[in-house]
Amino acid sequence: MSDQSIRLSVDAVVFGYEEGKTSVLLIKRKFNPFKGEWAIPGGFVKEKESLEMAVERELFEETGVKINYLEQLYTFGSPTRDPRGRVISVSYFGLVKPKAFKILASTDAEEVKWFSIENLPKLSFDHETILKFAIKRLQGKIVYEPIGFELLEEKFPFSDLEKLYTTLLGRDIDRRNFRKKIIKLNVLDELEEKISKGSGRPASLFKFNKKRYFQLKKEGIVFEI
Amino acid sequence: MSDQSIRLSVDAVVFGYEEGKTSVLLIKRKFNPFKGEWAIPGGFVKEKESLEMAVERELFEETGVKINYLEQLYTFGSPTRDPRGRVISVSYFGLVKPKAFKILASTDAEEVKWFSIENLPKLSFDHETILKFAIKRLQGKIVYEPIGFELLEEKFPFSDLEKLYTTLLGRDIDRRNFRKKIIKLNVLDELEEKISKGSGRPASLFKFNKKRYFQLKKEGIVFEI
């Protein structure tokens, strides 16, 4: 029906957030092409598995990280992106708390490491393009979907949520406006408990209202920051 | 490097907007599988062409419609979506004014037709899923990117823009709020000219401010409707 010789791969951009730092999970390639260089985890799709199964399997095999909520990002298909021939990459992305995962290099990966997105190594293939695309999507996403539930401590001062947003966005935000908007979303429960930090007044602790959080995640939010 | 036997296709969901109606461009398949049934235009990627070139070529071959600004929608890759074997579809979408195009069925298409999205025929493969996904994406998109420039007349009463949004969203909007928000975006120039419709007061005519429109298209807007 078609005499293509095109191969299909999947790649997983896994972002980590921890204490004001955004990182990304990369592997050092064990084999050619680009042997010894850093890359986004990923690999070829098996004939009987779905794209989602493939990306979860490849990520787990190469890094030891098991995530079942990666989102499809984009499909990269330039005819020259892989020196071996035509390889299409369906890329996925996700955002996790690095310390919740144990990393372990295996199969095609010689090493696996979290890199700060401020300090990235040279990347193989078109993986720099894919990573930049993922960063932009992540920054776009957090203004129409609440984030933080799996990333912050269970109870946290409001400043932690603020820091999460400024870190991921890579820029300052209008803090008063941001607070007003988050409060209006009704996604946080303010606790009686307070926390003392430095010399200022003790700050209230908050908790995500789980039901409301996942409801908004489904419905979408629209808020300008 | 991998013993896959996976084939790669592209599909183009082309929406049309005209006078309060949303339609979609479909073809009747000339060959099996699903011979004689309706489908989204598309086909196999050639080995040396980019995905974008492939989708534009397939759309043009099957329907006579030439569009060079289709956007990637999503990649559908279920192992069972095509009875011929494993075929991945990278889908694209766009929104045009139907009367700006002449349609002409050719190659794999026996017939080509605009269908109202309120009244769709049974679709081949998983094309109903793809189309639903595209409708959702289109509705999501118009709240962070201005639309209308290529869809409305050059000069139009505000009610035409309102109708465009309610039609594409498939629901009513808060009209006063909508007007306030659009005006605040500064994307319209109000003209001296007025138009008389029915028995009401003559309505002002507007024009898109081209520079501002394409600037916002690039930067993105955020507005709740």
Image: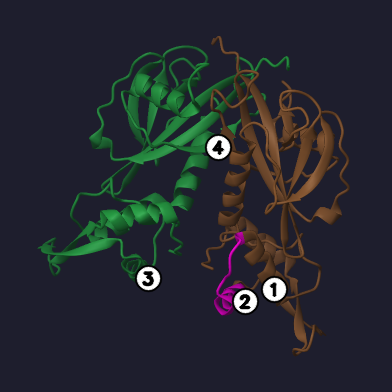
Chain colours: A green, B brown
Are the numbered discs 1 and 3 placed on the same chain, yes or no? Answer: no
Residue A144's place in the image compared with B90, above or below, is: below
Q: Which mark is residue B188?
A: 1
Query: For the residue labelled by badge 4, is the local secondary structure a helix, a strand or a loop?
Result: strand
Q: Amino acid at mark 2?
A: Ile
Chain of the residue displaying label 1:
B
Q: Which residue is mark 4?
A: A74
Depth check: give the residue in front, B136 or B71. B136
Chain of the residue displaying label 3:
A
Could you give the CA–CA distance between mark 2 and mark 3, rounded to whole angstroms?
22 Å
Residue A153 lies left or right of residue B112; in this view the side is left
Residue shown at the point (52%, 63%) measured from the top left: B222
Q: Which residue is mark 2?
A: B183
For residue B188, say whether it is visible.
yes
Q: Amino acid at mark 1?
A: Leu
Residue B126, by quadrant, is top right
Residue A54, by quadrant, is top left
Residue shown at the point (85%, 29%) measured from the top left: B107
Chain of the residue displaying label 4:
A
- Which of pointers 1 and 2 lies earlier in the amino acid sequence? 2
Which region shows up in magenta? B169-184
Residue A79, by quadrant, is top right
- Which of pointers 4 and 3 lies earlier in the amino acid sequence? 4
Q: Which residue is mark 3?
A: A177
Chain of the residue displaying label 2:
B
How crowded pointer 3 is (Cα within 10 Å; few <14, some 14-19, many 20+) is rated as: few
Q: Amino acid at mark 3?
A: Asn
